[in-house]
Image (cartoon, rainbow, N blue to C red):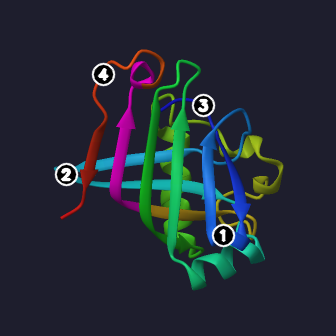
């Protein structure tokens, strides 16, 4: 996964979609232990996100490349606004290797650092992953891989 995420909020559908494009304020930090994956997304905790999380603590995210390779994840989501978690997530981005690592201070709303009211973390725990090489779409060749948490 490279580059930042753009998040499109669609409250009428009960989802927040994240797609890998050129916006600069949602970037995942990912960790895996065996077959359990967790992702963390830095975000601005808007009233819409709070309401969405309270009503639907799930998020669907997707990744697309110009060659039409795609990856999608359906995830349980936890919104964190406590200082300890926000500092930990902030540090993961500051000290993370590329493409995950970046300087969160580049986001104007985060100028006050990890304890800013405008900085929060969303922990994503995927329960379904799907990876499809673009060749499946463009050439009818290749394998689509799917993983479900059991």
* Location of mark 2 (residue): 35
Q: Which of the labelled discs sits on residue 3, or is there none?
A: 3
- When the figure is inspected, residue 72 is found, relative to residue 58, above or below; the finding is above
Q: Which comes sooner in the sequence, label 2 or label 3?
A: 3
User: Which residue is at 81% across, 56% downward?
Assistant: 109
Q: For the residues carrying marks 1 and 3, which lies nearer the camera in this image? A: 1
Distance CA(mark 2)–CA(mark 4): 23 Å
Predominant SS along the magenta part: strand
110 lies left or right of 73: right
Q: Which comes sooner in the sequence, label 1 or label 2?
A: 1
Is 31 or 108 nearer to us in this picture?
31
Q: Secondary structure at mark 2?
A: loop
* Location of mark 4 (residue): 142
Q: Which comes sooner in the sequence, label 4 or label 1?
A: 1
Q: Where residue 29 appears, x then y in whole percent?
A: 46, 46
Q: Residues within 10 Å of mark 2 (few under 14, many from 20)?
A: few
Residue at the farthest front position: 140
Q: Secondary structure at mark 4?
A: loop
Q: For the residues carrying marks 1 and 2, which lies nearer the camera in this image? A: 1
Q: Are marks 1 and 3 in contact (CB under 8 Å)?
A: no
Chain part drawn in magenta: 125-136
Q: Residues within 10 Å of mark 3 (few under 14, many from 20)?
A: some
- When the figure is inspected, residue 24 is found, relative to residue 17, above or below; the finding is above
User: Which residue is at 62% across, 55% downward?
Assistant: 17
Q: Where residue 84 appears, x then y in whole percent?
A: 50, 70
Q: Which comes sooner in the sequence, label 3 or label 4?
A: 3
């Amino acid at each position: 996964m490279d580059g930042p995420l753009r998040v499109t909020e669609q409250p009428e559908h009960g989802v927040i979609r994240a797609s890998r494009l050129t916006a600069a304020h949602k970037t995942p930090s990912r960790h895996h232990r065996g077959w359990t994956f967790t992702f963390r997304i830095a975000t601005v905790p808007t009233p819409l996100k709070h309401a969405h999380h309270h009503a639907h603590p799930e998020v669907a995210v997707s990744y697309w490349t110009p060659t039409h390779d795609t990856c999608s994840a359906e995830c349980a989501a936890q919104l964190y606004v406590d200082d300890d978690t926000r500092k930990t997530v902030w540090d993961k981005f500051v000290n993370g290797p590329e493409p995950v690592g970046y300087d969160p201070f580049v986001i104007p709303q985060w100028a006050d650092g990890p304890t800013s009211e405008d900085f929060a973390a969303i922990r994503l725990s995927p329960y379904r992953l799907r990876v499809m090489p673009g060749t499946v779409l463009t050439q009818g060749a290749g394998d689509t891989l799917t993983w479900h948490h059991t």
